[in-house]
Image (cartoon, rainbow, N blue to C red):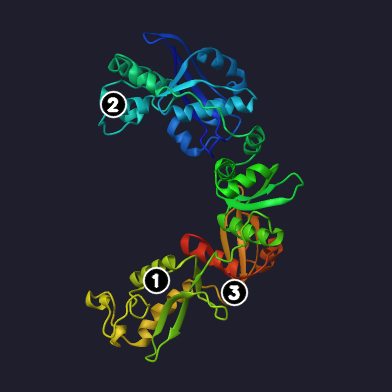
């Protein structure tokens, strides 16, 4: 027996979605023997793009049953069935998540009509449900609604069954859920974590912090710690009793908090932070002819670099990009050793500073733009990034080139007022690590909002 189904959801973060509509057809291989179709009140916000796609909005779901009210019916209609869906991994995960919220273990074998179609109907232009059914002449009504898509999947599955006459391919494609290899205590820890950006703290039985990290998806990162086989992960798995976390919304805030927290707590499983986090710096000097030269050199103790890089390769990549963007000379940027003109001059991408054809004044203007854009020395500014919630932003304060701290504000704050800005900032340490983190992040995130104070 098969339970052919389709589910519409609220959208949103992984494992935090809710069901808005479900349609299930119980199928014995010849005909439909039972069916269940219902809207579901997800008790959470529906993402705008989902409303546009499905037409299902919150008003439609006010009086719809909640999941716990339809759960028994779903269990009954799928009992002793293989669940069939177009991208069954998604639909099955959503069902399991809803049942897990009720404290009920839901396990079924699954079949994916995407994978079956790829094997039984090869060389199709697309295996999306809409394009595949259109190409095969299968009529679909009410696309992107659970009932319409479930009925289309029933018709598609009938076709696939007829093509696989001895049922060998379909039998091989049935997936049986593997028993989790995670210890029960590790599974409980993971379930309590959000799929959000932030800093996490791994604690041992004494409550001591043994490891601090940051991630754009805390739950996913902790799952990796609990399943990886490397030495650090094994030590974490043996010693962990609890994981606490702090949402940051912004990756930049998470990086800065991680750096400061590791220095303050010195967890036993964190490598010394992060003496090798950046090894190369961008430096400038003026040659005998008055031209400003740029070079990537290993970090020098007594010299302050313009900006820093994790390794020489990323530094050279940056220089190459600046040469292309600002028509700089490869010779004066240390990318080419020659006593005559550089290669770019020969292809008219260098103005001739290498042979003193372009004046130092004209050439240096462009070099100084590169320097100014990639340092915040002597600058007063606020860096605005994502907050922890929809109506919130994070802010990083730099005064006279010194990192002062960070904070969060709601969208109604006038944070270009320096006194208001200072009142919401939590002071933090300024050091070479924070300088590297901020400069590197600004370099990679060109759309970051920066307010000059």
Which of discs 2 and 1 lies nearer the camera? The answer is: 1
- Return the residue found at the far right: 206
Residue 56 seen: no
Return the mark for residue 87.
none
Between residues 282 and 413, which one lies in front from this camera angle?
A: 282
Give coordinates of residue 71: x percent, y percent. Answer: 59, 19
Tell me how many marks there are: 3
Element class at badge 2: helix
- Among the two numbered marks 3 and 2 on one chain, the one whose residue lies closer to the N terminus: 2
Which of discs 3 and 1 lies nearer the camera? The answer is: 1
The image quarter in which residue 315 lies: bottom left
Q: Which residue is mark 3?
A: 401
Residue 79 seen: yes
Give coordinates of residue 5: x percent, y percent. Answer: 45, 20
Q: Residue at x 64, y 69 (%)?
A: 430
- Return the residue found at the far left: 346
Q: In which quadrant is the N terminus drawn?
A: top left
Callout 1: 10 Å neighbours few (<14), some, many (20+)?
A: many
Q: Which residue is mark 2?
A: 134
Gap in angstroms between the C-alphas marked 3 and 1:
23 Å
- Among the two numbered marks 3 and 1 on one chain, the one whose residue lies closer to the N terminus: 1
């Amino acid at each position: 027996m098969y339970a052919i189904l389709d589910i519409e959801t609220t959208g949103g973060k992984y494992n935090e979605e809710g069901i808005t509509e479900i349609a299930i057809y119980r199928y014995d291989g010849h005909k439909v023997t039972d069916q269940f179709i219902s809207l579901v009140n997800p008790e959470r916000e529906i993402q705008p793009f989902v409303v546009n796609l499905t037409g299902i909005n919150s008003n439609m779901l006010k009086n719809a049953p909640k999941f716990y009210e339809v759960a028994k019916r779903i269990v009954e209609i799928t009992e002793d069935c293989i669940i069939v869906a177009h991208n069954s991994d998604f639909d099955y995960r959503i069902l399991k998540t809803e049942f897990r919220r009720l404290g009920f273990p839901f396990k079924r074998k699954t079949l994916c009509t995407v994978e079956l179609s790829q094997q039984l109907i090869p060389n199709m232009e697309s295996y999306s449900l809409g394009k595949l059914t259109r190409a095969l002449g299968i009529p679909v009504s009410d696309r992107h609604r659970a009932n319409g898509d479930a009925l289309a999947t029933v018709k598609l599955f009938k076709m696939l069954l007829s093509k696989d006459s001895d049922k060998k391919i379909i039998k091989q494609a049935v997936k049986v859920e593997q028993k989790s290899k995670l210890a029960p205590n590790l599974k409980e820890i993971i379930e309590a974590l959000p799929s959000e950006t932030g800093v996490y703290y791994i604690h041992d039985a004494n409550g001591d912090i043994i490891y601090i990290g940051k991630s754009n998806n805390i739950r996913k990162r902790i799952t990796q710690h609990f399943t990886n086989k490397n030495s650090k992960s094994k030590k974490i798995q043996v010693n962990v009793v609890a994981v606490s976390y702090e949402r940051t919304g912004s990756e930049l805030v998470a990086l800065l908090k991680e750096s400061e927290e590791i220095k303050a707590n010195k967890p036993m499983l964190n490598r010394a932070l992060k003496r090798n986090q950046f090894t190369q710096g961008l430096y400038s000097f003026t040659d005998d002819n008055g031209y400003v030269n740029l070079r990537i050199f290993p970090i020098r103790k007594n010299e302050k670099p313009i900006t820093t890089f994790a390794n020489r390769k990323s530094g050279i990549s940056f220089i190459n990009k600046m040469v292309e963007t600002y028509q700089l000379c490869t010779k004066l940027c240390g990318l080419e050793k020659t006593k005559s003109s550089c290669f770019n001059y020969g292809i008219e991408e260098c103005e001739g500073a290498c042979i003193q054809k372009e004046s130092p004044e004209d050439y240096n203007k462009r070099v100084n733009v590169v320097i100014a854009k990639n340092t915040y020395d002597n600058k007063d500014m606020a860096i605005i990034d994502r907050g922890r919630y929809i109506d919130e932003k994070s802010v990083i304060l730099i005064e006279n080139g010194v990192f002062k701290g960070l904070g969060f504000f709601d969208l109604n704050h006038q944070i270009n007022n320096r006194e208001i800005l200072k009142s919401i900032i939590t002071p933090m340490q300024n050091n070479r690590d924070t300088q590297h983190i901020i400069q590197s992040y600004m370099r990679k995130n060109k759309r970051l909002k920066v307010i000059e104070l």
